[in-house]
Image (cartoon, rainbow, N blue to C red):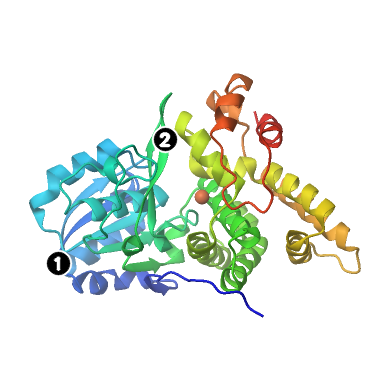
């Protein structure tokens, strides 16, 4: 008997090579004056950036541009909204990685509201629910990672001793339109392909084994994990591999849908606590911790022989190319395969970013297991983080 579940709305989505050419047509659904958020200063010089700007110009679309290089901070969003409040944009369009999409989503949500974004961030002192009003938002990802093009939240960072990573969340904040064109991913450099791809991998895996998973999220996350198994390393070692880029682009999108509906696990618990103190890219935190958290979950599931054990068995068979082995062989092989992948994709230890053993206690005390299938203890969390310093 199937258990009951809910499933949130998803964007009006277009997938496939050359679909970015449909951007002007999609923008015109709302009007012709837009705020364009791009991922880096190289956008206007890149081949695809120039082509997209030409398309906008040829179709009579006027735009102001904001370039972002880091995950969005509250002050930045507040300043942009104050400056552009009276420009009456028909839509906000983000073309870039997770930071550009999260920034665009936050601006679209705050542009019509004359208050600081801090008031609407979960966990804030004066928190109030965002009303869901917004300027229409179109997401065009150029990396395969956060899946923000499919989610209802945007993560706002404040880094430092009293830092935080908090979500602005409302069902209406799901992008109105997502255009997933794998051709835009071809020029993504290997180190970003690795970090963002491992973020998508983590999101799919955490959603698959989540305590909040449903038959629908398990089906979608399993398909996404199949794409990861087939194509993450290929996309890293040969960025021009069109099939691998397409698989990864869709895997990232699926990861966004799955995390919105099934939640995440301990790796993302660490991403919030570590990310509040240290300026480490989100994908690097997830990629670096994925193998150690995964192995700890597997150790417990082998002891418990519960539902999680069978989920790991299915994943072991998906990722491992050998036949006629024991259940436990497949499960442990999955842990080994993830370990090797982290090594091949050169995920760094955190000491590279200044994190030391002295930071263990404060980070672990603020780390939440979220919907991890195993409620890992403070001792376990300390052991996990210690292995990646
Ligand atoms: Fe993530």
The residue pinned by badge 1 equals 32
- Left/right of residue 305 with respect to residue 135 in the rendered view: right
Label 2 secondary element? strand
Identified at 61% across, 35% down, the residue is: 348
Mark 2 vs mark 1, CA separation in Å: 37 Å
Quarter of the image containing the C terminus? top right
Where residue 149 sits, quadrant-wise, is bottom left
- Left/right of residue 14 with respect to residue 326 in the rendered view: left
Q: Which mark is residue 164?
A: 2
Q: Earlier in the sequence, mark 2 or mark 1?
A: 1
Q: Position of residue 241 (x, y in %)?
A: 57, 62
Report crowding for label 2: few under 14, some 14 to 19, many 20 or more residues within 10 A (C-alpha): many
Res 238 seen here = no
In the displayed structure, 331 sits above or below 341; it is: below
Tally of numbered discs: 2
> In front: mark 2 or mark 1?
2
Report crowding for label 1: few under 14, some 14 to 19, many 20 or more residues within 10 A (C-alpha): some
In the displayed structure, 11 sits above or below 122; it is: below
- Left/right of residue 199 with respect to residue 294 in the rendered view: left
Q: Position of residue 196 (x, y in %)?
A: 52, 50
The furthest residue to the bottom: 1
Q: Nearer the viewer, residue 300 or 219?
A: 300
């Amino acid at each position: 008997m199937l258990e009951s579940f809910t499933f949130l709305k998803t964007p009006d989505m277009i997938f496939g090579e050359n679909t970015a050419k449909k951007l002007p047509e999609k923008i015109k659904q709302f009007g012709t004056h837009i705020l364009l958020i791009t991922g880096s200063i190289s956008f206007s010089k890149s081949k695809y950036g120039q082509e997209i700007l030409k398309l906008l110009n040829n179709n009579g679309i006027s735009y102001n541009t904001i370039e972002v290089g880091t995950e969005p901070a509250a002050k930045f969003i507040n300043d942009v909204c104050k400056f552009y409040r009276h420009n009456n944009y028909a839509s906000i369009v983000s073309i870039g990685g997770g930071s550009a999409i999260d920034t665009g989503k936050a601006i679209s949500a705050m542009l019509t509201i004359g208050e600081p974004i801090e008031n609407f961030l979960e966990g804030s002192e004066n928190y109030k629910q965002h009303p869901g009003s917004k300027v229409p938002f179109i997401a065009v990802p150029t990396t395969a990672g956060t899946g923000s093009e499919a989610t209802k939240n945007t993560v706002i960072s404040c880094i430092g001793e009293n830092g935080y990573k908090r979500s602005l969340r409302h069902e209406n904040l799901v992008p109105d339109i997502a255009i997933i064109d794998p051709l835009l991913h071809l020029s993504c450099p290997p180190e970003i392909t690795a970090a963002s791809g491992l973020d998508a991998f983590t999101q799919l895996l955490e959603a698959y084994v989540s305590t909040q998973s449903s038959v629908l999220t398990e089906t979608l996350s399993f398909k996404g994990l199949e794409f990861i198994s087939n194509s993450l390393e290929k996309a890293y070692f040969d960025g021009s591999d069109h099939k691998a880029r397409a698989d990864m682009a869709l895997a990232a999108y699926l990861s966004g849908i799955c995390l919105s509906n099934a939640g995440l696990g301990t790796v993302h618990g660490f991403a919030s606590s570590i990310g509040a103190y240290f300026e480490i890219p989100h994908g690097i935190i997830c990629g670096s911790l994925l193998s150690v958290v995964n192995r700890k979950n597997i150790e417990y599931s082998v002891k418990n022989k519960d539902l999680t054990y069978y989920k790991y068995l299915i994943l072991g068979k998906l990722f491992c190319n050998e036949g006629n082995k024991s259940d436990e062989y497949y499960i442990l092989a999955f842990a080994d395969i993830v370990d090797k992948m982290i090594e091949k994709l050169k995920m760094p230890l955190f000491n590279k970013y200044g994190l030391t053993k002295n930071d263990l206690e404060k980070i672990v005390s603020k780390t939440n297991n979220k919907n991890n299938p195993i409620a890992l203890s403070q001792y376990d969390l300390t052991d996990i983080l210690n292995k990646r310093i």
